[in-house]
């Protein structure tokens, strides 16, 4: 081992270097305590998982904060991740009924009624002006805040498919994202348009009650059974796509917290360990494609015509995987007519396909997904081109294609998002915004990274923009995202001091001291603070 010798030479030092003469200026000292947080108002749009986590963390971490949350309640569907992994780390629920839970049970765990109409940044006040519609009274009002956050989710803006004549249909017309709870499918002929994640879940759910079903399938998709990890495969032994937990098992977890946490860790480990499947030509990717293909061919052996239309030629995970319990079995049911032909138009009685055939039905279900293009959220946001005091949960390149999205929402929201408001309130900053160069660097990294992955392969996926650029996914695993975002890189942000015209003169930073008697700490408080921050020598030296 080589020795390192350091020689320290004395440097002539003059106080005049430090205490340099500056031009005389008048400095206005702020009449506020050094560690006194200024009042801060934050408007959060969205009451999904991100909004719930944000409300909890903001109120815990940011003092002197007024938090207002707006959004309408949305329906959910069936989970495509294990139920026990789809919950908060600090709010365990051991009584999930099934491995993949369904909508009512999900909503029971994730239990307002306002809708955001638009938001505009005010350069005069350095605040956000937000237009809100009360869905109870059907009246509009305006609110304003220092910080605006969006947590409405990636898949939130739904729209009817662009099919000629769709609004002329005289039967029942439904969309999977705006489901009618009073819809009765019993003994009806139903058309289901779309074979994405919504269609895959709706078809087997409606099948038992309908008289007949026309299922319009245009895209190919992987429908794996091996999507639940080792515990799922052990319990199912290759037979079936979902299972229910026994009451004895749920009781045991409820009474033994450590045993339940260990089960959750096992599921999480299983989900995180498969990230290599996202990389092109990796052993995991090759194995998955082979196993999925063999499995689908085996299950569709009685319907080779259907298999020909849905078995993909692109790799698994190019588009989102959906387990779809019962979907493939439903396609082989005599009541289901799989139609791979394009829809020409819709009239008052049914659907016309491009071959000229008319398919009369009583109801049409559009399982056609969401609009994910920029500006699709349904309300306009007008800033000044630099995202001033604007933050977003699951914004561009923030979703997860393999792993656990929920922990990505919880941990960055618990750190990155509340640290920025903390900087505004404690640092007496008025505006915080990302540097353009930092945004460009991240975007360039994403573009290069995804060239290595299956996400850049040719397939129809909402992960990608129209030109094939992957704009929805984080460039790495869930754990990679958590590690990256656990600390805010201040060097990537521009900061402007709050109330600059009053508290600052030219380029002099605002000065805050204990000047008001009310703000002076009580005697003894300073000593207590010092004692709290004293470390043992071993702690201080550990990082040297």
Image (cartoon, rainbow, N blue to C red):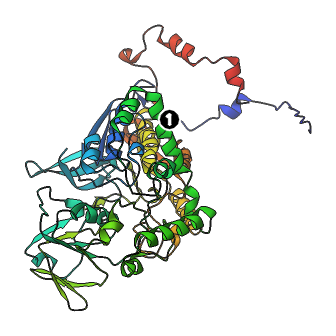
Q: Is residue 85 above or below residue 426?
A: below
10 Å crowding of disc 1: few (<14), some (14-19), many (20+): few
User: The residue tagged with tag 1: helix, strand or loop?
Assistant: helix
In the rendered image, the quadrant that contains the N terminus is top right
Indicate the quadrant where residue 285 lies. Answer: bottom right
- Quadrant in which residue 241 is drawn: bottom left
Q: In the displayed structure, would residue 162 be above or below residue 463? A: below
Count up the numbered dots.
1
The quadrant in which the C terminus is found is: top right
Q: Is residue 207 above or below residue 421?
A: below
From the viewer's side, name the closer residue of 34 and 281: 281
Residue 254 x %, y %: 37, 29
Left-right relation of 20 to 360 = right
**Nearer to the camera, 137 or 193:** 193
Q: Residue at position x 11%, y 56% from top? A: 182
- The residue identified by callout 1 is 262
Residue found at the very far bottom of the displayed protein: 356
* Residue 513 position in % (x across, y down): 46, 23
Q: Residue furthest top?
A: 523
Looking at the picture, tell me which residue is in the foreground, 331 or 280.
Answer: 331
Residue 303 in the image: above or below residue 231? below
- Can residue 471 be seen at all in this image of the molecule? yes
Residue shown at 38% from the left, 48% from the top: 99
Instruction: Give the percent coordinates (x, y) of residue 463.
Output: 43, 66
x, y (%) of residue 142? Answer: 18, 48
Q: Is residue 374 visible?
A: no
Check the image and name the residue furthest to the right: 2
Front in this rendered view, residue 2 or 84 = 84
**Is residue 313 found left or right of 51 in the rendered image?**
right
């Amino acid at each position: 081992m080589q020795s390192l010798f350091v020689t320290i030479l004395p440097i002539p030092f003059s106080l005049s270097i430090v205490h340099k003469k500056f031009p005389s200026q008048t400095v206005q000292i702020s009449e506020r305590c050094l560690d006194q947080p200024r009042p801060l108002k934050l408007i959060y749009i969205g009451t999904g998982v991100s909004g719930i986590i944000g409300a909890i963390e903001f109120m815990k971490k940011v003092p002197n904060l007024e938090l207002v949350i707006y959004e309408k309640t949305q329906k959910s569907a069936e989970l495509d991740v294990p139920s026990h992994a789809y919950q908060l780390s600090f709010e365990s629920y051991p009584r999930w009924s099934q491995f993949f839970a369904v909508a009512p049970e999900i909503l029971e765990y994730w239990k307002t009624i306002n809708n955001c109409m638009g938001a505009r940044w005010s350069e005069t006040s350095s605040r956000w002006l937000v237009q809100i519609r009360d869905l109870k009274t059907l009246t509009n009002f305006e609110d304003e805040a220092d910080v605006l956050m969006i947590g409405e989710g990636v898949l939130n803006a739904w729209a009817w498919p662009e099919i000629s004549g769709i609004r002329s249909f005289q039967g029942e017309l439904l969309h999977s994202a705006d489901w009618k709870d009073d819809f009765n499918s019993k003994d009806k002929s139903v058309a289901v348009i779309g074979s994405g994640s919504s269609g895959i879940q709706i078809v087997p759910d409606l099948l038992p009650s309908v008289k007949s079903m026309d299922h319009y399938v245009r895209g190919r998709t992987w429908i794996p059974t091996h999507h639940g990890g080792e515990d799922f495969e052990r319990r199912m032994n290759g037979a079936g796509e979902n299972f229910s937990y026994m009451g004895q098992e749920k009781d045991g977890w409820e009474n033994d917290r450590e045993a339940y946490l260990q089960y959750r860790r096992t599921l999480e480990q299983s989900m995180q360990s498969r990230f290599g499947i996202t990389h092109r030509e990796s052993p995991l990717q090759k194995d998955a494609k082979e196993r999925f293909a063999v499995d689908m061919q085996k299950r569709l052996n009685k319907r080779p015509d259907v298999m020909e239309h849905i078995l993909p030629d692109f790799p698994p995970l190019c588009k989102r995987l959906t387990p779809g319990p019962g979907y493939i079995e439903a396609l082989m049911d005599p009541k289901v007519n799989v139609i791979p032909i394009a829809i020409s138009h819709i009239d008052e009685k049914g659907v016309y396909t491009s071959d000229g055939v008319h398919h009369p039905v009583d109801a049409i279900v559009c399982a056609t997904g969401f609009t994910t293009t920029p500006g699709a959220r349904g309300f306009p946001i007008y800033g000044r081109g630099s995202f001033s005091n604007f933050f977003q949960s699951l914004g561009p390149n923030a979703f997860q294609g393999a792993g656990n999205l929920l922990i990505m929402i919880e941990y960055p929201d618990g750190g990155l998002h509340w640290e920025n408001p903390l900087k505004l309130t404690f640092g007496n900053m008025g505006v915080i915004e990302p540097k353009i160069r930092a945004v460009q660097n991240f975007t360039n990294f994403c573009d290069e990274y995804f060239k290595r992955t299956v996400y850049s392969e040719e397939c129809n996926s909402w992960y990608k923009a129209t030109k094939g650029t992957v704009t929805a996914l984080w460039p790495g695993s869930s754990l990679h995202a958590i590690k990256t975002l656990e600390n805010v890189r201040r060097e990537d942000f521009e900061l402007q001091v709050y109330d600059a015209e009053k508290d600052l003169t030219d380029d002099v930073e605002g000065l805050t001291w204990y000047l008001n008697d009310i703000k002076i700490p009580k005697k003894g408080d300073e000593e207590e603070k010092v004692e709290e921050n004293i470390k043992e020598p071993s702690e201080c030296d550990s990082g040297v």
